[in-house]
Amino acid sequence: MREIRELFEALGRSPFRSRFRLREREAAYLREKGMETILAHARDFIEKRLAPAEPANDGRQTPMRNHPVFIAQHATATCCRGCLEKWHQIPKGRPLSDREVQYIVGVIEHWLMRQRGETPV
């Protein structure tokens, strides 16, 4: 797993990753539901779609829109096991640990806070 500052510097150098932004629809959903609920959704998505050793439809399991977490996952390369391995040094072929799930949720939270103009902790 990477240090968050280093990760976000690298993501910022990626034309693909740095183009993602919350659209008004997703931003409104985030405001309406609140960060705590959205992060609970993130944990649920990660546990169901990424945590297994061999996730179903790996590489295609994360939609590109309609939820703030999906946008954040693509922006932060937490969308599939291949991206987790390449960007976060989390190996494929084994289930994610609780610590890794928490790390991924933290990365998503960091990106969402930046999208809201907040300074992440």
Image (cartoon, rainbow, N blue to C red):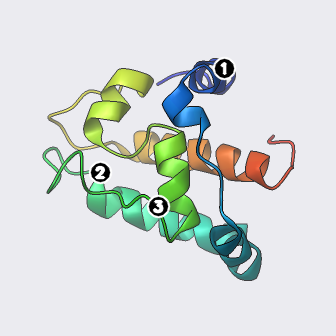
Residue at 35% x, 33% y is 83
Percent from the top left, x then y, of residue 85?
32, 26
Circles 2 and 3: CB atoms closer than 8 Å:
no
Give the mark nearest the N terminus, 2 or 3: 3
Mark 3: which amino acid?
A: Arg
Q: Secondary structure at mark 3?
A: helix
Circles 3 and 1: CB atoms closer than 8 Å:
no
**Quarter location, residue 61:** bottom left
Question: Which of 36 and 111 lies nearest the eye of the viewer?
Answer: 111
Give the mark nearest the N terminus, 3 or 1: 1
The residues bearing labels 3 and 1 have C-alpha atoms spaced at a distance of 24 Å
In this image, 39 relative to 99: left or right? right
Q: Quadrant of the C terminus?
A: top right
Mark 1: which amino acid?
A: Glu
The residues bearing labels 2 and 1 have C-alpha atoms spaced at a distance of 24 Å
In this image, 107 relative to 60: left or right? right
Residue at 14% x, 57% y is 56
Q: Secondary structure at mark 1?
A: helix
Residue at 54% x, 69% y is 40
Circles 2 and 1: CB atoms closer than 8 Å:
no
Q: Which residue is mark 2?
A: 50
Percent from the top left, x then y, of residue 22?
65, 58
Q: Secondary structure at mark 2?
A: loop
Say if 90 sits above or below 65 in the image: above
Q: Which residue is mark 1?
A: 9
Question: Crowdedness of circle 3 by 10 Å Cα count: few (<14), some, many (20+)?
Answer: many
Mark 2: which amino acid?
A: Leu
Percent from the top left, x then y, of residue 55?
17, 52
Percent from the top left, x then y, of residue 28?
73, 76
Viewer-nearest of discs 2 and 1? 1
Q: Which residue is mark 3?
A: 43
